Image (tube, rainbow, N blue to C red):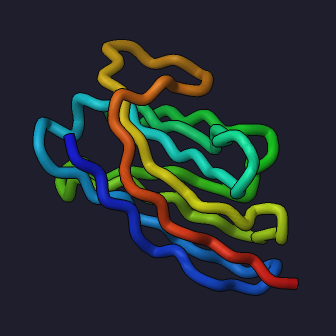
């Protein structure tokens, strides 16, 4: 599966942004998908994940209550809605997919990665 993330940009602290990740190739609904982020010089950080059906989600503590992941399997797209953004949310955001056959409430180990999209939160 190929993944293409978009929607990054510059936003003020307290603002909102929605990222999209469009998938092509194999059946998108077969993949648990997730979002990660990375600040230059630091390790990639898990943000959250959503089950194949979209009925279950799991988030890192750092974004819980502010970020929401959803998906539209008919459109082969997963979304990351980010609200109440903070300066520390500034990073390159990546979408990813894993061919899991079961739901796991925790970080995934993706088999596929999209290219990143930069989110910059200013004070």
Residue 75 position, x and y percent, is 20, 58
Identity of the residue drawn at 65% across and 51% down: 38
In the rendered image, the residue lying farthest to the right is 123
Q: Is residue 32 above or below residue 73?
A: above
Q: Quadrant of residue 12?
A: bottom right
Left or right: 96, with 22 as reference point: right
Q: Decide which of 20, 94 is in the foreground and name it.
A: 94
Identity of the residue drawn at 75% across and 46% down: 42
In the rendered image, the residue lying farthest to the top is 102
Identity of the residue drawn at 48% across and 24% down: 109
Q: Is residue 67 above or below residue 108?
A: below
Left or right: 36, with 34 as reference point: right
Q: Decide which of 31, 42 is in the foreground and name it.
A: 42
Left or right: 28, with 95 as reference point: left
Residue 29 position, x and y percent, is 23, 36
Q: Name the quarter where the C terminus is drawn.
A: bottom right
Q: Is residue 48 above or below residue 86?
A: above
Identity of the residue drawn at 56% across and 70% down: 118
Residue 5 position, x and y percent, is 38, 62
Left or right: 109, with 64 as reference point: left
């Amino acid at each position: 599966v190929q993944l293409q993330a978009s929607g990054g940009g510059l936003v003020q602290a307290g603002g909102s942004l929605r990222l999209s990740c469009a998938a092509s190739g194999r059946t998108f609904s077969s993949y648990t998908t997730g979002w990660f982020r990375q600040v230059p010089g630091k390790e990639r950080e898990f943000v959250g994940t959503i089950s194949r059906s979209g009925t279950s989600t799991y988030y890192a503590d750092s974004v819980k209550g502010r970020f929401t992941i959803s998906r539209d399997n008919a459109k082969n797209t997963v979304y990351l809605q980010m609200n109440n953004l903070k300066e520390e949310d500034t990073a390159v955001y990546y979408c990813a997919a894993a061919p899991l056959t079961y739901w796991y409430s925790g970080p995934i180990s993706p088999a596929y990665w999209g290219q990143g999209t930069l989110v910059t939160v200013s004070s």
